[in-house]
Image (cartoon, rainbow, N blue to C red):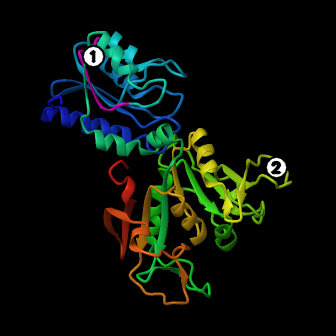
């Protein structure tokens, strides 16, 4: 394993911070940051802002100019080695005359997948890999999930009381969590390429599922995905307004024709619902690498049973709602502890009076 100095760590941490700036705008591309330095002196910085635009290395090399020669480039993801809408970044680094490239994480995309590293080394450039690898993986968890598993990285958001309920059964109250918690949800929505919900939630609450304020002019509004196997959702619902794009997912046997500017996906399914695996494959192929789910207990339970949830984003309000309130999930009864769905607590933070928990399935906690 390569030895990394404190200066190396500082530069890669900065590159990761730069990559984070593209969290709302880069999909379907990964989030990437780059720092070019001579020792502790930074001569160039950049991050990928939006698909189709220059990559992080190009921005950093432009800033560095002639000072890139003999420098070290710190990149959060393996430089691309193919020509798409932009040039190959490995070639730009070679032509700029950098001496060394430090990479946090390899790029498994089939058109890169080690080729960028190999060609840098073939050009006589020293390449070291693995500095802050887990942080880089976390930053691009959705992109990596799509490339490796052909499905988005799925975050299931839920709010509940201390006794595991989501709302009073008589509909007397809409929110059980605080305004601070609801504001926090906006942060996670903004980082998502798509937001998934079911027809029951739309009919009960008529949500807009938009981000109240996008982070920058370059930010991309998440695609709203509405599962509606029985075609119950009217086209006048707020999820179909012009504030953000929407995808209406219906059963393949439906004879319904699309209205003007309506995006419809037809899927197969059975009595339990539409084919969720096929849905994930479709969204992944469209470049929707990070998906947030805001749904009722049935769809949430179906996703969990299908093993399609990578993280629970759970807001816990310090109140009791009682037995007549709606349950958090609809799941079949488990016969033994060996059959249960187990999670690892990844993070816990107090948001106003509520707790925000992030939990990940035990079977994928080591690779999430």
Q: Residues within 10 Å of mark 1 (few under 14, many from 20)?
A: many
Position of 232 relative to 137 (above/below): below
Our reading of the magenta stretch's main secondary structure is strand
Q: Which mark is residue 351?
A: none
**Which region of the structure is painted magenta?**
97-106
Between residue 147 and residue 339, name the one nearer to us. 339
List x then y, in percent, for residue 21: 39, 41
The residue sitting at 81% across, 54% down in the picture is: 253
Looking at the image, can residue 213 be seen?
A: no
Q: Are marks 1 and 2 in contact (CB under 8 Å)?
A: no
Find residue 236 and report its image quarter.
bottom right
Asked which secondary structure carries label 1, the reply is helix
Position of 155 relative to 69 (above/below): below
Q: Is residue 116 magenta?
A: no
State the CA–CA distance, disc 1 to disc 2: 53 Å
Q: Which mark is residue 258?
A: 2
> Is 309 on the left-hand or right-hand side of 353?
right
Between residue 275 and residue 288, name the one nearer to us. 275
Q: Which mark is residue 68?
A: 1
The residue sitting at 56% across, 74% down in the picture is: 330
> Is 269 on the left-hand or right-hand side of 106?
right
Quadrant location of the N terminus?
top left
The residue sitting at 67% across, 68% down in the picture is: 206
Q: Residues within 10 Å of mark 2 (few under 14, many from 20)?
A: few
């Amino acid at each position: 394993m390569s030895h990394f100095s404190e200066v190396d760590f500082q530069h890669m941490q900065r590159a990761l911070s730069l990559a984070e700036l593209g969290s709302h705008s880069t999909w379907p591309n990964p989030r990437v940051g780059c720092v070019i330095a001579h020792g502790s002196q930074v001569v160039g910085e950049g991050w990928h802002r939006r698909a189709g635009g220059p990559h992080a290395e190009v921005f950093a090399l432009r800033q560095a100019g002639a000072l890139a020669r003999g420098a070290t480039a710190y990149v959060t993801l393996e430089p691309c080695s193919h020509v798409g809408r932009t040039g190959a970044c490995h070639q730009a680094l070679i032509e700029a005359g950098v001496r060394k490239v430090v990479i946090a994480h390899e790029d498994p995309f089939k058109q890169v997948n080690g080729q960028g590293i190999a060609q840098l080394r073939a050009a006589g450039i020293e390449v070291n890999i693995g500095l802050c690898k887990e942080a880089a993986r976390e930053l691009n968890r959705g992109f990596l999930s799509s490339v490796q598993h052909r499905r988005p990285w799925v975050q299931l958001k839920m709010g509940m009381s201390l006794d595991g309920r989501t709302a009073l059964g008589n509909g007397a109250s809409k929110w059980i969590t605080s305004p601070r918690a609801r504001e926090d949800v906006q942060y996670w929505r903004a980082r998502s390429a798509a937001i998934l919900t079911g027809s029951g939630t739309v009919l009960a609450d008529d949500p807009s599922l938009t981000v109240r304020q996008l982070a920058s002019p370059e930010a991309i509004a998440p695609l709203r995905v509405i599962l509606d196997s029985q075609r119950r959702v009217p086209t006048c619902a707020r999820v179909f307004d012009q504030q953000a794009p929407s995808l209406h997912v219906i059963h393949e046997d439906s004879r319904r024709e699309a209205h003007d500017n309506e995006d419809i996906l037809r899927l197969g399914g059975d009595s339990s619902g539409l084919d969720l695996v096929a849905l994930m494959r479709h969204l992944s192929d469209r470049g929707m690498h990070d998906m947030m789910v805001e749904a009722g207990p049935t769809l949430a339970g179906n996703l969990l049973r299908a093993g399609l949830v990578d993280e629970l984003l759970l807001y816990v309000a310090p109140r009791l709602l009682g037995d007549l309130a709606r349950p958090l999930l609809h799941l079949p009864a488990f016969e033994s502890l060996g059959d249960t769905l187990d999670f690892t607590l990844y993070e816990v933070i107090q948001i106003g009076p509520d707790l925000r928990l992030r939990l990940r399935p035990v079977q994928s906690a080591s690779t999430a």
